[in-house]
Amino acid sequence: MFLRSSNLVLANFRTFITVLFIAILVLFFQMKILSLEESQKQLEKTVEQLVKSNNNVRNSILSNSIDQRKTNSDRDLIIIYNRVPKTGSTSFVNVAYDICKRNRFNVLHLNVTANQHTMSLADQSRFVHNLTHWTARKPGLYHGHVSFIDFAKFGVTQRPIYINILRKPLDRLVSYYYFLRYGDNYRPHLLRSRHGDKMTFDECVQRRLDDCNPDNMWLQIPFLCGHAAECWVHGSNWALEEAKRNLLAHYLVVGVTEELTDFIAILESALPTIFHGSLQHFQSSNKSHLRKTNQKVEPSEETVAQIKKSRIWRMENELYEFALEQFYFLKKRMGIGPDGVVFDKGQQFMFEKISPK
């Protein structure tokens, strides 16, 4: 009986030892598994950090490359404002002169001998070469009373950005008529070519004199048309259509005198490295009041009706209306502030479904 009891105790002891061993072994392997899992998590975390770090480095390199390209692009910008006379051009240009040092760009006035609005072919070639190779003056805004020049015709790869401002053709003619007689507030003591002539625009139209001839309105079309002979033929349908084509194909923005503030706002949003702060400067300074004709008598209804019978007025007005339509199209894509001035709404597009990851 005692022996059987002893054997039972021994068997139970062995079973206990076996179970204990198995339990310790299971616990050991569980601890190993937990340790391996922890090591795996740590390894995965380290790998993730390395991948993220690598991506950051790659993105940083890519970002720097993009920034570098952007900087080079900004540095090479050439803007040509082939300004039409009596369209508010002086007000705009003086804003550019005021902000150019702060925004680190150059402003240069193009003076064509004898106030000609076209250049010889040789001068066109020299002009194109100077603008594209004059690195010390890049980025640059060039302005002057010269008609459109197509840089592509001279085989250069760098094309300028053209901008311009148009005005209602009759308003421009009347303003120019009185400007020649009374000058303006920009240089009030400078005597103009018709100084002393007191004849009103109405009287001029009644007498059918040259200074108020509707043919004198034929200027905005040629300025946008260019240097082709047909551009300067009064009443040319081809010139009108070519001016429209150039406006769409080569001009970033063509504004209108009556909405000069919005013109500057659009330029600032489209070319911020050049025109940053130009709108605020224009609104807070006296630049919007530059170069106003000292004395001007509005034409009578009879005179206006007479001028509007002219084919030249109809064609110049058609270009003006065409430019106005395009300008309003640009404005509609922007926001309108409480003051009625357009502003950039910020980026309105995004990239998605990018592959590969």
Image (cartoon, rainbow, N blue to C red):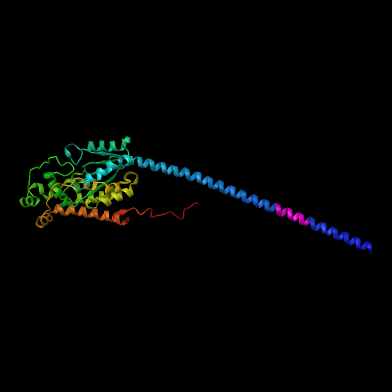
Q: Position of residue 341 (x, y in %)?
A: 29, 54
Does residue 152 show up? Answer: no
Q: Residue at (53%, 45%) from the top-left corner?
A: 53
Residue nearer the viewer, 109 or 210: 109
Position of 207 compared to 136: left or right?
A: left
Q: Position of residue 189 (x, y in %)?
A: 14, 40
Does residue 4 show up? Answer: yes
**Number of disc labels:** 0
Q: Position of residue 22 (x, y in %)?
A: 78, 56
Q: Tell me which corner region of the image, top left, top right, bottom left or bottom right, holds residue 26.
A: bottom right
Q: Position of residue 201 (x, y in %)?
A: 9, 50
Residue nearer the viewer, 215 or 35: 35
Quarter of the N terminus within the rendering: bottom right
Does the magenta run of residues contain 320?
A: no
Position of 274 compared to 110: left or right?
A: right
Furthest-left residue in this view: 207
Q: Residue at (38%, 40%) from the top-left corner?
A: 72
Above or below, 110 relative to 249: above
The residue segment tinted magenta is: 22-31
Mainly helix, strand or loop, the magenta region? Answer: helix
Furthest-bottom residue in this view: 1
Residue nearer the viewer, 175 or 304: 175
Position of 350 compared to 207: left or right?
A: right
Position of 259 compared to 14: left or right?
A: left
Above or below, 127 relative to 346: above
Q: Residue at (73%, 55%) from the top-left corner?
A: 27
